[in-house]
Amino acid sequence: MRFQREIVDVWDAQKRLEPWIRPLGTEKVKLTDSIGRYLGENVAATHDFPHFRRSMMDGFAVRSADTKGASEECPVTLQVIESIPCGAVPTKKLTANTAVRIMTGAMMPEGADSVVMIELTEQMQKDGQTYAVVKKETKPDENVIPIGLEMAKGTLILEKGRKINPGEAALLAAFGYDTVTVSRRPTVAIFATGSELLDVSEPLEPGKIRNSNSYMVAAQVLNAGGIPVLLEKVPDDVGLAKSMILDAMEKVDLVITTGGASVGDYDILVDIFEQWDGKMLFNKVAMRPGSPTTVGVWRDKFLFALSGNPGACFVGFELFVRPVIWGMQGKPDIYLPSFSAFLAEDYKKKDSFYRIVRGKSEVKDGKIYVRSAGIDQSNVLSSIRDTDCLIVIPRDRNVMNAGEMVKVLRLNVPE
Ligand SMILES: Nc1nc2c(c(=O)[nH]1)N[C@H]1C(S)=C(S)[C@@H](COP(=O)(O)OP(=O)(O)OC[C@H]3O[C@@H](n4cnc5c(N)ncnc54)[C@H](O)[C@@H]3O)O[C@H]1N2
Ligand code: MOO
Ligand SMILES: [Mg+2]
């Protein structure tokens, strides 16, 4: 007799995972290899940024007082005493009625407090001397980037757990972090179960389908920062399947299986969870798709038995596996971020389970609308392609009308 299933609310099921999520620890990698990974420690500014006064424009560094009253009709003429390209250090100090030709990003000379753009000047030669004819007055600090404009030495610039996106990579480079401490990426074994499954390269046969879940889940694992390890198919033999899964659990950081989680005669994951010496956290969630999603912990490692239906497998991953993979990498917000949106079409359901609808969002007249990305059935695979969010239809709302507000979980978010 298979054990009873206690129906758990979606958010309670997520909470049951939390006590078991352990950050994996860190490693040092080259900056280029750190991109897309999660920072393993706080990062501080190693110097003021910028660390010297810089010109914001190509033009002339001047003393603003010398340009007072300058205009097209009544320009001011200043003697050019030096030209400073980017990377050079000025050798002269500006004194009254002198200027320095300067390029964008170059170091400001002492004595200068502003830069006049080249377009507002003319350069001329007289008696072997170079002069800048300035046709507009400048204000103190105009076109000058001061020391520490962006941040002072020692400022916390990136917090532990942050994903290294373009902005983070630029800061790490700017502050000299040639190597970066990042969180270890969890290795994730993926097993597909089911005698109906063909390998991708095999020709179709009546009654059989190709294993698509393993590749979908591998893409999800990669997207969450994990390292997918695709393993061979699990046969519908409980003893063999159990030893294969437990063997994999010794070698990787977590294991995902797909299929065999429901009540059918060959739904072997159920038997494995009955026989093992691990802890089962839940085996039925009040949601569709994905109601038979089962999660356990064995020797401090997670085993996720996602259901075989592609839609259910996809949703089960996003709600339960992703938070664990994120948490193992030290990401502080482990759940998909949510927002509110208007339903673009009516939604009807018959039971008191949540519907986690694979959704598509669009912005119209400044409002966000969401609709189903395709046929909203657990067995449907193709709608996942167009899914950019998950629409949460509450348990107690069997009819929702177009125009009503719903909670939406965002997918593929830039973090
Ligand atoms: N009598 C009942 N039947 C079912 C129930 C129920 O409560 N009572 N639950 C249904 C729900 S809900 C779901 S979801 C599915 C869950 O099925 P399993 O997790 O047991 O998965 P399988 O039986 O192995 O397969 C279901 C379906 O998915 C296809 N599949 C499996 N693996 C893959 C793969 N790797 N790639 C692509 N497609 C895959 C499989 O061929 C089946 O069509 O159970 C309902 N039944
Ligand atoms: O809960 Mo199942 O995943 O509806 O189809
Ligand atoms: Mg089944």
Image (tube, rainbow, N blue to C red):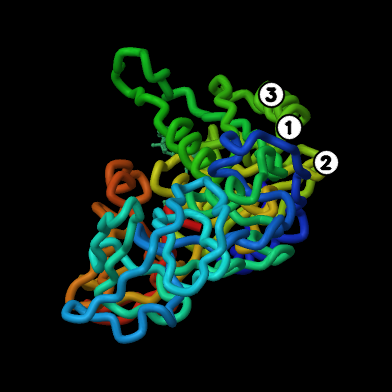
Q: Give whichever of 20, 414 is nearer the camera.
A: 414
Q: Position of residue 114 (x, y in %)?
A: 44, 72
Q: Nearer the viewer, mark 2 or mark 3?
A: 2
Q: Quadrant of ligand 1?
A: top left
- N-terminal of the two: label 2 or label 3? 3
The vertical placement of 205 against 121, above or below, is above
Q: Amino acid at mark 3?
A: Met
Does any portion of residue 289 appear in the rendered image?
A: no
Which residue appears at 76% of the width and 54% of the height?
Answer: 20
For residue 356, which quarter of the picture?
A: bottom left
Label 1 crowd (10 A; few <14 / some 14-19 / many >=20): many
- Is 91 situated left or right of 141 in this image? right
For residue 388, which quarter of the picture?
A: bottom left
For residue 364, which quarter of the picture?
A: bottom left
Q: Position of residue 166 (x, y in %)?
A: 48, 49
The vertical placement of 245 against 57, above or below, is above
Label 2 crowd (10 A; few <14 / some 14-19 / many >=20): few
Which of the numbered marks, if any, corresponds to residue 244? 3
Instruction: Give the residue number, with chain letter if any, for mark 1.
Output: 249
Q: Position of residue 266 (x, y in %)?
A: 54, 32
- N-terminal of the two: label 1 or label 3? 3
Q: Are marks 1 and 2 in contact (CB under 8 Å)?
A: yes
Does any portion of residue 64 appear in the rendered image?
A: yes
Q: CA distance from mark 2 to mark 3?
A: 16 Å
Which of the numbered marks, if any, corresponds to residue 299? 2
Q: CA distance from mark 1 to mark 2?
A: 9 Å
Q: Position of residue 317 (x, y in %)?
A: 52, 48
Q: Give whichever of 18, 293 is nearer the camera.
A: 18
Which residue appears at 83% of the width and 41% of the height?
Answer: 299
Which residue appears at 76% of the width and 44% of the height?
Answer: 24
